Amino acid sequence: MSPLSFHSINTTDFTYVDDVKYTSAVLFTIGKTSTVLKFPYLRQSFQKTGKNVSTVIGETLPNTMILAIAAISVALILGLFLGVISALYRDGWLDKFIQVVSTMGMSVPSFFSAILFAFLFGYVLHEFTGLKMSGSLYEMDDYGEAMHIQWRNLVLPAIVLGIRPLAVITQLMRNSLLEVMSQEYITTAYAKGLTTLQVINRHAFKNALNPVVTAVSGWFASMLAGAVFVEYIFNWNGLGKEIVEALNTLDLPIITGAVLVIATLFIIINIFVDVIYVWLDPRVKLD
């Protein structure tokens, strides 16, 4: 079953769209015929009696999206900065230090980093950081009357989830920038009297982003599924934690619906990245 499907129906026989199993949106109407965008029926959860899978995903997916966006933002900002610094001080002690740290970041499993960060910053250094070992984005207040956003609970899982893409982005940016800096037009820019900062800002940085964009798109899409262990360890109420619980209880509709949604988002993200390529490199054209 495709995640989304288009149907042209007669408006005098519109009953099946209003059926409890399906939700849809009318795109346009011509005469008595309407074209609607129909969303799939994902059935009901086996364990959560009377609760649709779409409702469960709708409650947990936004939390996972927020976590993934925060993690990839941390990785992108720090990764680009460290990659540029590493390229500028090539083969120096700072470059070697960044390379060693980034290699370690790629080697350490996410679940181990999550346990380490939760214990160190959420327990041992709790008095200084104010962070907790676990917690979701929304938490009930002390009186049990209302839910409040707890942004501090986002800090540790976002950092842990962003460690591996941070290491990849750092090395990709370093290698790509070094390759761009060896081009002839960069030599011409130096010959015109531009400083290193001006050359990087005006000519090299943008041209070195292509492999980084590819890595970021892949990592962001994988985070929607790869946040499983991180969400479970930090008790983050997201789609990853829901998948773990569904696997433990053999709740197949939840698992099927989650895989379908993640696959759809992966396709959408890759289409968006293809559009970004056109902006980064004028030589690339969309057919």
Image (cartoon, rainbow, N blue to C red):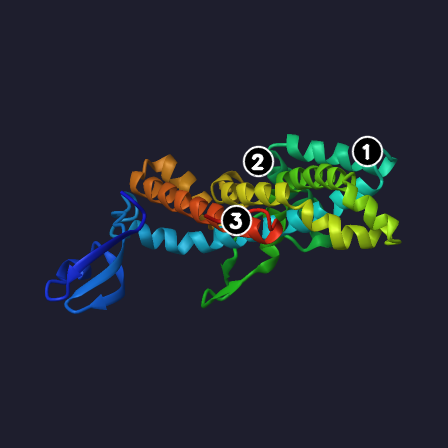
* Mark-to-mark CA distance, 2 and 3: 40 Å
Near mark 3 (Cα within 10 A), the count class, few <14, some 14-19 or many ≥20, is few
Q: Secondary structure at mark 2?
A: helix
In the image, residue 75 sits, relative to residue 13, either above or below, namely above
Residue at screen point 79% across, 40% down: 87
* Residue highlighted by disc 3: 285
Task: Compare residues 173 and 287 and report the one nearer the observer.
Answer: 287
Q: Is residue 73 left or right of residue 194?
A: left
Q: Earlier in the sequence, mark 1 or mark 2?
A: 1
* Residue highlighted by disc 2: 111
Task: Compare residues 143 and 61 and report the one nearer the observer.
Answer: 61
Spot occupied by residue 37 in the image (x, y as percentages of width and height): 28, 57
* Residue highlighted by disc 1: 96
Q: Secondary structure at mark 3?
A: loop
- Identified by mark 3, the residue type is Lys
- Identified by mark 2, the residue type is Phe
- Identified by mark 1, the residue type is Lys
Near mark 2 (Cα within 10 A), the count class, few <14, some 14-19 or many ≥20, is some
Q: Earlier in the sequence, mark 3 or mark 1?
A: 1
* Mark-to-mark CA distance, 3 and 1: 38 Å
* Mark-to-mark CA distance, 1 and 2: 27 Å
Spot occupied by residue 26 in the image (x, y as percentages of width and height): 26, 64
Q: Secondary structure at mark 1?
A: helix
Q: Quadrant of residue 213?
A: top right
Q: Is residue 132 visible?
A: no
Residue at screen point 59% across, 36% down: 110
